[in-house]
Image: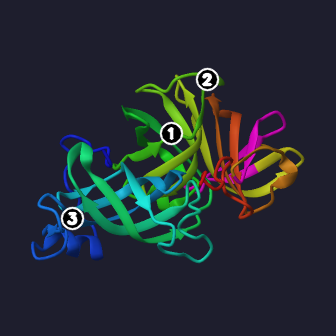
Amino acid sequence: MSVARRPGLAALAVTGSLLLLVSSPATAFAADHHGSGPHARSSHFALNGLVVSQQGTTAVVLARTFADRTGVQHNVNVSVTVGAKQGHSRSHHATALVVGDQVQMTGTETGSGDNEDLTANHVSQHELRAHVFVGAITAINGSVITVAKAANPSDDQGACDHPGRGFGVDVSQASVLVDGAAGALAVGQSVAVLGTGYHDAIVASAVYAFTTAPAVVAGEIKAITGTQVTVDGRRDSSTVIDLATTPLIVNGNVGGDVSMLSEGTKLLTLGTSSNGVFTPTLAFAFNGGDRHPVGGNESEG
């Protein structure tokens, strides 16, 4: 089975070539093409998403949009065969896909059901940087969890649009901590997901889950005094946070400290709030440096 389909998933309207290819019955998506054998039929597919893994010539992609002859699906894992000399991009050849990077693929689809096979004949890959995404788990479907967005859902402003649309997160490559210890994810937990995202599709390298929802302070650092940082929030409010004993993840890498921060650094901090006093317990900072998260290296080939 090449596509992990979700029952009852409504087709989504998408822009550009995906919409044109699916909407017209005269296109390749609607018409099967007969091969030499009586049962050899193929159609075309297109997807846009994030690399989850690659083994040999088989890649798994979390598709934000996947369009084939049956319609359009959203946030589904798709297994695709990628040929040795197919496609190229600015910095990565198609056979050296990088976990967490964005990919666009088009190709042919043969068979159906358990015998369905997707073969890409064009692959374009684009590097993405690490961000943190915050919310609460509302559903778990295999390795993909659905996360309802928090009020401050990310340091990435692009992830803050469409607040009513949840994140689809692949956690198959992620380390998971629940209340600071190894554990299992469950519906109802609050999570901070470290990884790369394309709109509302995310490939996680680490998931920090909490049985009690933490308070969130997010914004841009405006001043640093010793271990104290002043953060300007998104509603013209400022908060002073002492990071002296707070675990700090900088540009997707654990083990950071305040000396790595500067004015203008984006900070998202989790903690507790009591009587107007915020106490941090975990902080994520992004300052434009190397922002591939841990685990975001090349897949095995």
Sequence order check: which comes first, mark 2 or mark 1? 1
Above-or-below relation of 108 to 5: below
Q: Residue 282 carries which label?
A: none
Report the span colored magenta: 230-251
Determine whether the residue tagged by mark 2 lies in a helix, strand or loop: loop
Please, what is the three-letter code of the amino acid marked with disc 2? Asp
- Which is nearer the eye, 299 or 248? 299
Q: Distance between the residues labelled 1 and 3?
A: 32 Å
Q: Name the residue under label 1.
A: 171
Residue 134 position within the rendered picture, expressed as x and y whole percent measured from the top left: 52, 42
Above-or-below relation of 97 to 254: below
With 224 as the anchor, is 270 left or right in this view?
left
Which residue appears at 34% of the width and 50% of the height? 165
Quadrant for the N terminus, please: top left
Graded by Cα atoms within 10 Å as few (under 14), some (14 to 19) or many (20 or more), the crowding at tag 3 reads: many
Please, what is the three-letter code of the amino acid marked with disc 1? Val
Q: Nearer the viewer, mark 2 or mark 1?
A: 1
Please, what is the three-letter code of the amino acid marked with disc 3? Ser
With 132 as the anchor, is 40 left or right in this view?
left
Graded by Cα atoms within 10 Å as few (under 14), some (14 to 19) or many (20 or more), the crowding at tag 1 reads: many
